[in-house]
Amino acid sequence: MKGRKPKPAEVRQREGNPGRRPLPQPVLVAGRAAPSPPTGLPAEARDVWDTIVPTLEKVGLLDGIDAVALEGLCVLVARARAARELVERDGIVAHTAKGVPVVHPAVRVERDAWQAFLRFAEQYALTPVARTRLGLAELQRRSLADELDVSIGANPRR
């Protein structure tokens, strides 16, 4: 997509929807099964999978075909964490063969992995702005309100 990213529906609604175009409605993929973790997924990436996938499935954002993209997302987090551990162990400065101090190569690996992760994360509403763009922020507010109503004994919203 070229140009500016669209304003979140909530912002357009707050501003009075000056363009008078219809606001997007939240779209969920209901009733589809989440993909199974791929075989050979490294242990750290599997931990990320086990953290992210159940939540995305609960919200209804997953389909079986998402396995490859989710694998990439999880591997990127694992790679960024491994690079961070290297930097913490060796220090941020490394030395060339001639003894010249340079920034540790793992710093770049970590930075690139997190940047790529954030691009993936936006596609799966893993950032607050992405959730708002997809209309999931309003859905989350509604479900939280329902949970509060149930926990304090009031009638849940329907």
Image (spheres, helix red, strand yellow):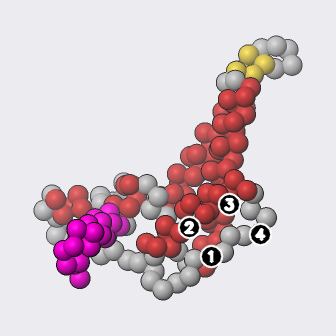
Q: Position of residue 91 (x, y in %)?
A: 70, 23
Please state, as top left, top right, bottom left or bottom right, where the N terminus lies in the image.
bottom left
Indicate the quadrant where residue 52 lies: bottom right
Element at label 3:
helix
Residues at marks 3 and 1, CA–CA distance in whole angstroms: 13 Å
Which residue in the structure is indicated by mark 4?
A: 39
Residue 103 seen in the figure: no
Indicate the quadrant where residue 102 lies: top right
Of mark 2 and mark 3, the one earlier in the sequence is 3
**Looking at the image, residue 125 lies above or below residue 34:** above
Residues at marks 4 and 1, CA–CA distance in whole angstroms: 12 Å
Q: Residue furthest left?
A: 16
Q: Considering depth in this image, is 155 or 140 the residue closer to the camera?
A: 155
Q: Residue at x 23, y 78 (%)?
A: 156
Which residue in the structure is indicated by mark 3?
A: 46
For the stretch drawn in magenta, the main secondary structure is: helix
Which residue in the structure is indicated by mark 2?
A: 53
**Looking at the image, residue 20 lies above or below residue 74:** below
Q: Considering depth in this image, is 22 or 120 the residue closer to the camera?
A: 120
Query: Residue 144 lies in magenta, yes or no?
Result: yes
Q: Which mark is residue 35?
A: 1
Element at label 2:
helix
Query: Are dots 3 and 1 in contact, CB under 8 Å?
Result: no
